[in-house]
Each structure stands twice: as C-alpha cells, then as structure tokens.
Image (spheres, helix red, strand yellow):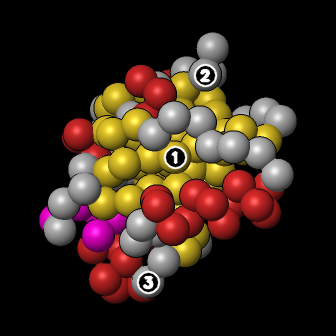
Amino acid sequence: MKIHHVGIAVTSLGQAVPVFEKLLGCPAEPEEVVEEQKVRVSVFTLGESRIELLEATSADSPIARFIAKRGQGLHHLTLAVPDLVKALEELERNGVRLIDQQPRIGAGNERMAFLHPSSTAGVLIELVETK
C-alpha cells in the first residue's frame, strides 16, 4: 500500500489553484469534473503521489456539506491498493465499516471506494485500485 493522494476541500479552485501552484512550484493538471461525486478536481502530481483540490459543483455534494460543517481543508487520504474488491472484502471481514460496498469510478477514471471514518480513527479513507 502507498499514499495515492490527499484530497483537500476548497470553496474555489480559481482561488486555491494559484496558491498551490506557488507553494508547489508546478502547474495544476487540467481540471476534471466527476459528475457522480458532484465535484470539480484540480490535481498536482508530486512524485508518486498527488494533491487533489476539490470544489463542489452543487450545494448537495459531499464537498459542499463538508465545507459547510468543517470549512476548507483536508478532506480525505487515499491509499493505492492492487485489488480493490479483495481489499474491501478483507477490511469488512476485519470489522472496518465501508461507505462503498462496491467500487465506483472517481477522478482519472479510477476505481475507488471510501471507508467510513468511524472505523478509521476519524479520517475519511479512500482506496484506489492501481495496477
């Protein structure tokens, strides 16, 4: 397992992207909209890991609800796994509460699933399948 990316909830990509471009010294990749998650994503690749800035596209999106409750900031940590279905089955067997029982398609057209923070020390964990 390795860190795939860190997701950061922001109110405006237009405001946040220039800050991170200056901070990281590199440009963001082209923005992507993930309709299922109701989010616009701007990605910065740093070696083998990424930082994803996430802006809600709708008031009822998970990111909008997160920002309304907690403000901008760290939203989730994503870990890369070679077999997502196997990882979910094993975690559930070991008592980890899953948000997603089956993989979904996320940013970059990658298979992903979320684990419930109540089982992961209060941290929203996303698993992404990498080959």
Residue 112 appearing in the image: no
User: Is 52 situated left or right of 92 in this image?
Assistant: right
Closest to the observer: 121 or 78?
A: 78
**Which residue position is annotated with label 3?**
71
Instruction: Give the secondary structure at mark 1.
Output: strand
Q: CA distance from mark 2 to mark 3?
A: 31 Å
Residue drawn at point x = 82 percent, y = 52 percent: 25
Instruction: Give the secondary structure at mark 3.
Output: loop
Amino acid carrying label 1: it is Ser
Q: Which portion, as a residue range, is magenta?
A: 60-64
Q: Earlier in the sequence, mark 2 or mark 3?
A: 3
The location of residue 84, given as percent across then percent down, is: 50, 27
Amino acid carrying label 3: it is Gly
Q: Earlier in the sequence, mark 1 or mark 2?
A: 1
Task: Give residue 11's quadrant in the image.
Answer: bottom left
**Magenta segment, prevailing SS (helix, strand or loop):** helix
Instruction: Please tell me how crowded label 2 is: few (under 14), some (14-19), or many (20+) other residues with Cα within 10 Å.
Output: some
Amino acid carrying label 2: it is Thr
Q: Which disc number belongs to residue 72?
A: none
**Which residue position is annotated with label 2?**
130
**Which residue position is annotated with label 1?**
42
The location of residue 27, given as percent across then percent down, is: 69, 43
Instruction: Please tell me how crowded label 3 is: few (under 14), some (14-19), or many (20+) other residues with Cα within 10 Å.
Output: some
Q: CA distance from mark 1 to mark 3?
A: 18 Å
Q: Earlier in the sequence, mark 1 or mark 3?
A: 1
